[in-house]
Every structure is written in structure tokens, then in C-alpha cells.
Image (spheres, rainbow, N blue to C red):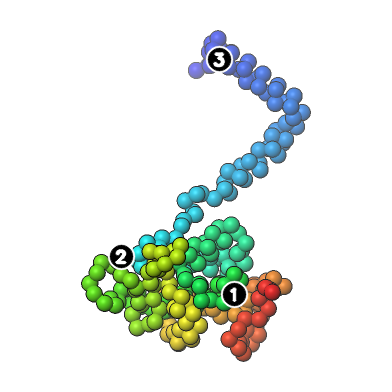
Amino acid sequence: MPLKATPALLKTMNDNKQRLRCVRSLFGKDYSMKVFKYLFPLLLLLFHVPSLASYELADTSSPKHTLSSFMHSSELVIKYWQNEQLDDPHAQHALRQTLRTMDLSLLPNRNRTVVVMERVIQLREILDRLEPSSLELTLESDERPIDHLEQWRFAHTDIVISRQLEGDKSGQYLFSASSIQQLPRWYQTMAVFPYVEENRANYHHEFLISPGPLFSKAFILSLPDSYLDLYGPFPLGNGEP
């Protein structure tokens, strides 16, 4: 059925022709490419601006919430670290939220990223080797509700989430300062145990062989296994003063 040229349709067509002339006057004959040139960056922004939902604050209101927040945010920051993207704003946010679950007051040089990243990785190495039942609460004293305990000790370990009693973090539950201080020793103790999740990469080994900014991690990992043998407990060439 042929389209009937009604007055309304003719008016719409004339309006569109006027808009087209306006665009051509602004951008010239090759207006379509110029429009694309100006709109393409806007489209990129539209599809690459991160959702606000991807930014979450650590919940330290109870021992279980602290553990859940640490596991979630540390998973993110470790992925960014593995991809050598720790400067990414999302990575920096994830790192800050991970550290909010930890009492770093007894940790020397805690302002250095390489220092705190090693403790984050060591804690994940320990927790990822514990059976799920070991992550359950071990009561320290009485039968108070879980959210009102003074501390939460992981079964068969000295790793504790404790309630802060003073300072600006009073009332929050954090991995205790003494637990953070003991992480290197506990990592060595737990290193002989298998991971609960099979085929999981050894984050701490990756950390120790990380080359810093002079070489890419992919280049180091491409070297023969003999080049990746460790002859000491400390990372070399981390790129920080």
C-alpha cells in the first residue's frame, strides 16, 4: 500500500531536511564522519564509566562481615596486581577497602604498597588453605551473640579478628595487629597444606618473583623454571625506594 503524503508527514519531512541542512552547515559535506568523530569519544565514556555499584565499602561491623569484606576486596586487588594494574582507580579503591579490615598499627613501613600487599597476599594464602569448617567461629569465652564477641579466632590458628576498643575505629572488627604481625610465620606454617580450591596459583610465589617496573611480569614468568627458584624469603627489585 503506497504511503499517503499527508500534511503531517510532509511537515515532518521538511523539519528533518532543515535539521540535515543545519548539521551540514556545521560540519561540511563530510558531516557524517565528523559527527562520528565527535560522538565516538562520548560513546566510549558511556560504555566505560564504571558503575557506582562496583565501588563498595568494607563492612567491619561484625567478625563475619569483616571476613566477607576482606575476601571480596582482596580478590579484586589481587587480580589487578596480577595484571599489573594497581594504579587503576578500582584497584586503589579495592586495596583501601582491604586494608580497612586489617589493623596495621604494628606493621613497619605500612605506607609502602609493597609491604601491605605482601601481608594481604599472605593472609589470603593462609585463609585459602583452611577448610571451610575452620573459617567458622571458635567461641573464646561464652555464648554471646556472634556480633558482640570481643574476638573471633580461626580454628587451630592464632589468626584473630578482634573488636577495636579505642581510637577512631572503636567498635569495628579488624584482623588484629598481632595477627598481621605474625602473618609471615603463619604463612610458612601453612605453606605445606594444599589449597581448598584446586589449581589455584601461589600468589606469594608470584609476589616474590615480581620484577617491579623494569620488566613485565609476563616476561619473568616466561623464563625457564630454574630462573624462578627462590633463594631467600624477601622479594628483590620491587621498584620502591
> Which residue has dot 3 on it?
9
From the viewer's perspective, is 239 left or right of 161? right
- Quarter of the image for residue 91 reads bottom right
Q: Which secondary structure, mark 2?
A: helix
Q: Nearer the viewer, residue 120 or 9?
A: 120
Q: Earlier in the sequence, mark 1 or mark 3?
A: 3
Q: Nearer the viewer, mark 3 or mark 2?
A: 2
Q: Residue at x 38, y 64 (%)?
A: 171
Asked if residue 204 is positioned above or below residue 16 in the image, the reply reads below
> Which residue has dot 1 on it?
109
From the viewer's perspective, is 178 left or right of 150? right
Residue type of the residue flagged with mark 2: Asp
Q: Which secondary structure, mark 3?
A: helix
From the viewer's perspective, is 136 left or right of 191? left
Q: Which mark is residue 147?
A: 2
Asked if residue 150 is positioned above or below residue 158 in the image, the reply reads above
Q: Earlier in the sequence, mark 3 or mark 2?
A: 3
Q: Position of residue 239 (x, y in %)?
A: 68, 73
Residue type of the residue flagged with mark 1: Asn
Q: Residues within 10 Å of mark 1 (few under 14, many from 20)?
A: few
Q: Nearer the viewer, residue 230 or 99?
A: 99
Asked if residue 61 is positioned above or below residue 45 in the image, the reply reads below
Q: Position of residue 209 (x, y in %)?
A: 62, 79
Q: Position of residue 82 (x, y in %)?
A: 58, 69
